[in-house]
Amino acid sequence: MTEPKKPMAEANRISSMLNQVLGIERFPVQVNEVAQEYSRQCFKDSPIDRIQGEDLDGFDGLLKANKMRSKWLILYNSARQSDGRKRFTIAHEFGHYILHRHQQDIFECGDGDIETGDNNERDIEAEADLFASTLLMPLDDFRRQVEGQPISFDLLGHCSDRYGVSLTAATLRWIEIAPKRAVLVASRDDHMLWAKSNRAALKSGSYFATRRNTIELPRDALAHSYHGFDLADNRTGRARSWFCREPSSMPVTEMAREAGQYDYTLTLLLMPDAEWQGPNHDEEEPEDTFERFIRNG
């Protein structure tokens, strides 16, 4: 049985080649050109022959082989306004080609399959996302962009521009390497749509289980309409306002920014290391609720 390919290893291999040929200031990745040229050089018997936009109904991206499996086609939804989303979609389908093309002949990926940030389970959509994120935003370069600087949405916006991805994708990438506990929340109309906690936050029980629950933002949250959201706002408050089991002395730094292309608001919560270990939530497994939200429309 063939050993499954690892998304990060495959993406890093391609990134190393791009660094050698183009240098480290090669961003954003021209992923359509990379996908076609790499497949032609490395898989001459079944390369990616075409990449094109179509007005797709019901899904964002498609990878499909011809009858002889001698050529592959990538389609992305041209109706999407965000160029960053289109780039991520192409990279996602390229990930399916590299990692999974021997498993099936066609991959049809909907909204919930792309740019989810869920890399915790062995699932082909999560693996394609991890490949795309690693290819478009290599961690060594990402760290160079943020190292030694206080985190802010302005800094993450710089990363978004550099890599040609959405602010959401850049922020999800950052929380993977955040030095302390970090939680990203997307909300609309004072209610959470999805939330993503990094590993340190998950281990301490700092996450929002929106799978079965409708969760309102805290009344004093920056993004709550009662508070009067200001794009420039960030502040330090009490973590207990967000997480009821946090000690009363635990601070949280909160910053918010509108993600216009998605019509929601991003709130980034930053906390020091936990003073305690949160209990296991047997009734509901921690999840990447961004993926759950998108899958359910």
Image (spheres, helix red, strand yellow):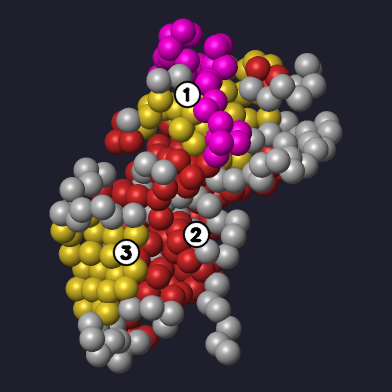
Q: Give the numbered dot on residue 232.
A: none
Residue drawn where x is 83% and y is 31% of the image:
275
Q: Secondary structure at mark 1?
A: strand
Percent from the top left, x then y, of residue 217?
Answer: 53, 20
Residue 1 at what x, y percent from top left? 58, 89
Confirm or deny contact between disc 2 and disc 1 (CB under 8 A): no
The part of the chain drawn in magenta is 208-233
Pick the front one: 248 or 158: 248
Q: Are marks 3 and 1 in contact (CB under 8 Å)?
A: no
Question: Disc 1 marks which residue?
Answer: 191
User: Can see residue 199?
Assistant: yes
Prevalent SS, magenta region:
loop
Seen in the image, is 176 located left or right of residue 74? right
**What residue appears at the point 50 percent right and 55 percent down from the top-left corner?**
141
Mark 2 vs mark 1, foreground winner is: 1
**Disc 3/disc 1 C-alpha distance (Å):** 30 Å
Label at residue 126: 2
